[in-house]
Amino acid sequence: MQRKVMDVVVVGGGIVGTAILRKLSFYDLTVALVEKQPDVCEGASKANSGIIHTGFDAKPQTVEAECLRLSRELWPDLVSQLKIPYISCGAVMVATSEEEKEIIFSTYVPNAQANGVEVHWMEAEELREMNPAVSDQALGGLVISDEAICDPFWATRANAELAVLNGAEVLLGAGVERIEQEVDHLRLVLDDGREILTRYVVNAAGLWADEIARMIGDDSFTLTPRKGQFLLTEEQVDITQIILPVPTKISKGVLISPVVFGGFLLGPTAEDQEDKWDRSTTSEGLTFVSEGCSKLVPQTRNMSTIRQFAGLRAVCSEGDFVIRPSSQNQRMVHAAGIRSTGVSASPGIAELVVEKLEQAGLMLDPKSDPTLELPELFGEADGSETGEIICLCRSISRGELLGALSRPIRCTTVDGLKRRTGATLGECQGNCCIPKIMDILAEQSAMGPEQPLKGLRHSHVAMRGAK
């Protein structure tokens, strides 16, 4: 049985786990990340709004607010170093009644001030000048200039790849089956038969972080999934900012936002459930999104969409991020209970987790010359005739696909190539190009053509028929 001895193992390949891995890779440590799915960013991180929140509405004095504060200082350098697609468009919380305007001034302005986030009121005339599609009922809005949008998968992948370039290991398709506690180590037994002996574990397992904690007898928090359904449209919407509703006591409501790779995103819903795997969409949920957005931007009511999807985010029993050593064993540090601001807060979470590891006894000696900047995504691919266009909707060539397959994080799925290149994201949603993409994946891997995966484990696109 294969056995590895590490200084730190991060469990979970989402935006939080990879941000922590990237930070750890700058130190003279042996570090690894284990992820049960075939690729990074297959959980909550892949199905969100892509908004980088400032934390203007976060509850002051919480761990979440502190992580968002730290992250505001870190994001500019990250965008440059990791070449993350990013648009600093700003956001505006639109008031459509005097009551909503009063809520903004009595609640959100002082909350933003407490969190050190600059905001200002925009009158209706200026609001519609910047966002002509906004409802005539709008009285104005609260502008949060530093809100932005990014590609969350790119950020997740880039974190992991930079860590690999600095010597970290990433083990994909390797779920944690159990954790055995020893005197000076934790032993991770993976469901593929491997074992990893490590001095410290970072629990960044997303919705499953409470289950990882219970493997060492820690039941101090529980996580339940909250579903968010989204609509994606490529119709033109005459807005330049993220359009936010004024939250109610029941819900934050639905928003409409530009998307970095084109189009507009509408959503999400907020549906509490028990099933951590149920990412289905419903006609009721999508109608709720459409009607909710139409109150702010009327034209969205009858928009055509190219995709509908749902993601699950964690709702924590503690009502805040859980970033601390486990009460059962100081060698496990939790990065759990990360709700919808996970992408935004991930750089700050990484800073706090590394600080907690140091307090728990991990020696942090910085590397003398770590790699800080990620090379360009698409390099020169090997082979000839790589200019053939595979994805007609997005003009993605065979060479670009081969280039993506040669990156430090091995891609083995159709969805993995989609998120690395944009292939299948166009109007036909892959109906024309998926067969060729499957052929390319089969050519470049040991996996046979009868077993291409769409994304998650066992999500086979096609299987060889019985003879």
Image (cartoon, rainbow, N blue to C red):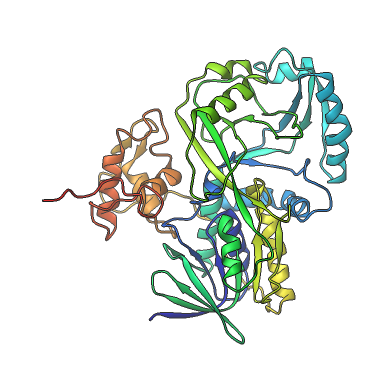
Considering only vertical position in the picture, is 92 above or below 34? above
Q: Which residue reaches farthest bottom? A: 183
Q: In the image, residue 421 lies at what x, y percent?
A: 42, 43
Image point (40%, 46%), residue name: 415
Q: Quadrant of the N terminus?
A: bottom left
Image point (57%, 45%), residue name: 273
Left or right of 313? Residue 120 is: right
Q: How many marks?
A: 0
Q: Which residue reaches farthest top? A: 136
**Of residues 348 and 278, the one drawn nearer to the viewer in this rendering:** 278
Considering only vertical position in the picture, is 91 above or below 22? above
Whether residue 25 appears in this view of the structure is: no
Left or right of 376? Residue 104 is: right
Whether residue 185 appears in this view of the structure is: yes
Image point (50%, 59%), residue name: 161
Q: In the image, residue 158 lies at what x, y percent?
A: 53, 54
Q: Which residue reaches farthest left? A: 467
Image point (56%, 46%), residue name: 312
**Of residues 127 and 270, the one drawn nearer to the viewer in this rendering:** 270
Considering only vertical position in the picture, is 93 above or below 303? below
Q: In the image, residue 205 lies at what x, y percent?
A: 56, 60
Q: On the image, which quarter does residue 112 sit in?
A: top right
Q: On the image, which quarter does residue 324 sit in?
A: bottom right
